[in-house]
Image: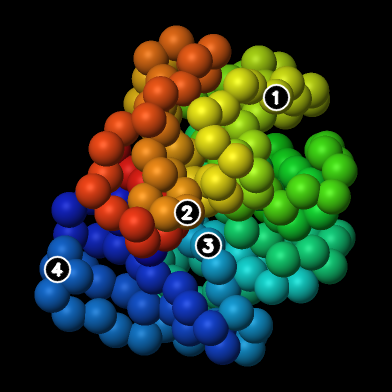
Amino acid sequence: TYFINDKIGWGVAEWGTIVHTQDGGKTWSLQKAETTKALLGVFFVDDQTGWAIGNSGEIIHTANGGVTWEKQRSGVNRDLFGIHFIDAKTGWIVADGGVVLHTKNGGQKWGQQANLGEVWLSGVHFTDRLNGWIVGIGGLIMHTTDGGATWKRQQGYTDTFLRDVFFLNPNKGWSVGGEGIILHTTDGGEHWRPQRSDSRYNLNSIYM
């Protein structure tokens, strides 16, 4: 799911399912997209402009709040798991196989910005055009200071699958994952420390 405020949000699921709420989740309505692939992630920059991603390189885009969706070409056949935009033009997607996709024109063209090896990448978050983080299998955390041109591995705390990451600013962030793991940093990821969740369930996403 992704919410742009306390009322308006979207959720995605298998068989191209997209649902939308305008009352904070009290009621949901189906939105139709011309895809039957499992959708694994969704992101909106405002109440009109958004993207959903999924299996086999599927990317769909809406410019009218989800009334209609159109396909964008990813150029890969990987399963796409994490997506983040800093504005209506500039965004990143991460996938299995260590693939990082990037667009500078709202997805009219996606390019493979990096290939980090045969690793499963699941979450991505940027605080601005330069500073970003990705997480994935085996406790993987990587950081870029040049908009994704190069990535450097950060020393994590766990070898558990990390599924999502979120930063409030270039210093303060969290990552969550398997078996209730929550990691927190206050120095841009130079050091990550666990926080207590009192859960053994997989934590799949985080938003602060």
- Of labels 1 and 2, the one closer to you: 2
Query: Which quadrant is home to the N terminus?
Result: bottom left
Circle 1 Cα neighbour tier, 10 Å, few/some/many (<14 / 14–19 / ≥20): some
Which numbered disc flags the more N-terminal residue, 4 or 1? 4
The residue that appears at 85% across and 61% down in the rendered structure is 76
Which residue is labeled 2 in the image? 178
**Circle 3: residue type:** Gly
Q: Give the spatial CA distance, label 4 vs label 3.
A: 21 Å
- Of labels 1 and 3, the one closer to you: 1
Residue 89 can be seen in this image: no
Using the image as rendered, state which of residue 207 and residue 67 is in the foreground.
207
**Circle 2: residue type:** Gly
Q: Position of residue 196 (x, y in %)?
A: 27, 37
Query: Which numbered disc covers residue 23?
Result: 4
Query: Which numbered disc covers residue 153?
Result: 1
Query: Which numbered disc covers residue 182?
Result: none
Residue 183 can be seen in this image: yes
- Of labels 2 and 3, the one closer to you: 2
Q: Give the spatial CA distance, label 1 vs label 2.
A: 20 Å
Secondary element at tag 4: loop
Q: Give the spatial CA distance, label 1 vs label 3.
A: 24 Å
**Circle 1: residue type:** Arg
The residue that appears at 75% across and 44% down in the rendered structure is 100
Which residue is labeled 3 in the image? 41
Circle 4 Cα neighbour tier, 10 Å, few/some/many (<14 / 14–19 / ≥20): few
**Circle 4: residue type:** Asp
Query: Which quadrant is home to the C terminus?
Result: top left
The residue that appears at 84% across and 50% down in the rendered structure is 118
